Image (cartoon, rainbow, N blue to C red):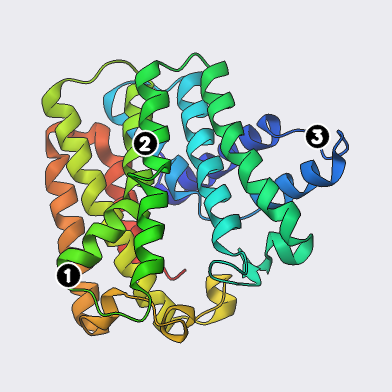
Amino acid sequence: MTDFATWTRAAQTRIETALARALPAADLEPARLHAAMRYAALGGGKRVRPMLAYAAAEAVGPGNDLTVAAACAVELIHVYSLVHDDLPCMDDDDLRRGKPTCHVEYDEATALLVGDALQSSAFEVLAEAGASAEMVVLLARAAGSRGMCGGQAVDIASTGRTLDLTELEFMHIHKTGALIRAAVLLGALSCGALSGDRRAALEHYAKCVGLAFQVMDDVLDAEADTATLGKTAGKDKAQGKATYLTLMGVAEARDYARGLVDDALAAILPFGDAARRLAEIARFIVERQY
């Protein structure tokens, strides 16, 4: 079996190819919109969510074309959220994945339409691959008011306030965790139906990994520099955002993330070596530098 670094590079290449095929050609009218969509989606990012989809498929059975579509759809939703998150009416950022944000490179109106179009493209990709209604609904809920958008609404309402741990985790289970949960479940469901026990195990893994991912994002926002992150460092503190570092120190936050990962690893023990990649991604999340 290949090592994690090799597997990661192969998975990133696979999703880049899938995204390039799924997105309209840059010279197809309206060319400016299509070029901006490709600018936002291609050539950057860790691709953690599609990697989780691939890894979950490996845990339950051999992946297939629907697995690739699921991974692609999740990443399209994620990229759309980043484009909108960077807009002046939201976080007003000018750097993403080491290059100017979409609204800086193009303009605000185009960036708004890019996000809208990427979101609809996600469901087009899933439907064309023959996804079940369950898979489509799962992604829709993860992206909507009971998932990512709802979490973002809580984040906006909480700016300048100190949340307790329960409130903070409610926000991040929705804002960050919902799409991570969708990535894991969509990857697994692309291989067929899941038994109740196996689904519950994957859901618990995803919940823990999603929270750990956010904890480390908060730590890195405070500790890493802009060049390493590929986005503006220190933005959360400057904007008065509620983060894990408003409740605990850096060392405590890192320990908390490691505890979440340990919990995630325990959840997938019944899958044995088939869940090796899920375990490696969980460890990567707490060890990453960007």
Q: Can I make out residue 42 in this image? A: no
Q: Residue at x 41, y 42 (%)?
A: 144
Q: Amino acid at mark 3?
A: Ala
Which disc is residue 249 wearing? none
Q: Secondary structure at mark 3?
A: loop
- Distance CA(mark 3)–CA(mark 2): 29 Å
Image-quadrant location for residue 218: bottom left
Q: Nearer the viewer, residue 100 or 158?
A: 158
Q: Is residue 217 left or right of 163 when viewed as pictured?
A: right
Which disc is residue 141 wearing? 2
Q: Residue at x 22, y 37 (%)?
A: 202
Q: Nearer the viewer, residue 263 or 144?
A: 144
Residue under label 3, please give it: 25
Residue under label 1, please give it: 165
Q: Nearer the viewer, residue 261 or 178?
A: 178
Q: Is residue 1 left or right of 256 when viewed as pictured?
A: right
Q: Callout 1: 10 Å neighbours few (<14), some, many (20+)? A: some
Q: Is residue 198 left or right of 183 when viewed as pictured?
A: left
Between label 3 and label 2, give the one nearer the viewer.
Answer: 2
Q: Secondary structure at mark 1?
A: helix
Q: Residue at x 31, y 21 (%)?
A: 61
Percent position of residue 47, x then y: 50, 49
Q: Amino acid at mark 2?
A: Arg
Q: Secondary structure at mark 2?
A: helix
Image-quadrant location for residue 108: bottom right
Q: Residue at x 39, y 49 (%)?
A: 148
Looking at the image, is mark 1 or mark 2 earlier in the sequence? Answer: 2
Looking at the image, is mark 3 or mark 2 earlier in the sequence? Answer: 3
Residue farthest toward the front in the current orientation of the protein: 157
Looking at the image, is mark 1 or mark 3 earlier in the sequence? Answer: 3
